[in-house]
Amino acid sequence: MLTAEPHVLLAQRHGRLTKLDIQDELAAYSMPGIQQGEMVLYYPEAVPNSRADIAFVSRHFDGGQTIAQLYVPLGDFTAAESVPHVSDPNLKLGGAHLEAGAWDYTQKYKDEMAFRDEIRQRLVPTAPLDSQQPRQQPHHKRKSKPAEKSEYQKLLERGKELGIPAIPKLSTEELKRRIKLTESPEPQAVGHE
């Protein structure tokens, strides 16, 4: 459904649409992203939902408004150059703008992108409405509480006070034993006089 100005619709009905009529659309238009090697649908007549061929992107330019080159593997591997996306406003102008045909994503690609978007929406917490508010932390992270020292940490500190060297991977029981030995008074020598 077109949402253009009435004079644009009238001009389009009579086949007299000009770049001036769609200048706002042209200024806002950016070709959807595509990567080299991707499979796309190629419409030789530049009419979506008409006969389409499978094609492969052989060259494109980042930020460009058309795919530089598509290979259509029909018997002779036809190459189509400067192919616009079916959403390109220039296609409304007709004539020479339709000669290169048009491309669109395959239904499989569209389904995969919809699935990925759905997964992202489930995984990524929504941004707060007010950008001044801090983002909420994901539920799976523990909130830090004032750290209470574990029994092991307390024993390590006590051992350090007593001059017991900190040995990595020393068990709690062994640390307790060493502290007990260090704290206990040395046995008095029983003398035989």
Image: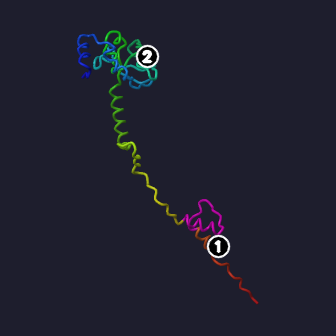
Q: Is 148 rendered above or below residue 9?
A: below
- Asked whether 177 or 85 is in front, the reply is 85
| Quadrant (top left/top right/bottom left/bottom right) for the C terminus | bottom right
Callout 2: SS: strand
Indicate the position of residue 118 as horizontal and vertical percent values.
Answer: 34, 38
Classed neighbour count for the residue bearing mark 2: other residues with Cα under 10 Å, few (<14), some (14–19), many (≥20): some
Residue labelled with disc 1: 182
Indicate the colouring scheme: rainbow
Query: Which tag, 2 or 1, sits closer to the chain's start?
Result: 2
| Quadrant (top left/top right/bottom left/bottom right) for the N terminus | top left
Indicate the position of residue 14 as horizontal and vertical percent values.
Answer: 23, 10
Inter-mark Cα distance, 2 to 1: 81 Å
154 inside magenta stretch: yes
Task: Name the disc covering residue 101, or none.
Answer: none
Residue labelled with disc 2: 69
Q: Is 81 rendered above or below residue 109?
A: above
Which residue lies most toward the right here? Answer: 193
- Circle 2: residue type: Gln
- Asked whether 178 or 122 is in front, the reply is 122
Callout 1: SS: helix
- Circle 1: residue type: Thr
Q: How many marks?
A: 2
Q: Is residue 55 left or right of residue 160?
A: left
| Region in magenta | 152-173
Q: Is 161 rendered above or below residue 5?
A: below
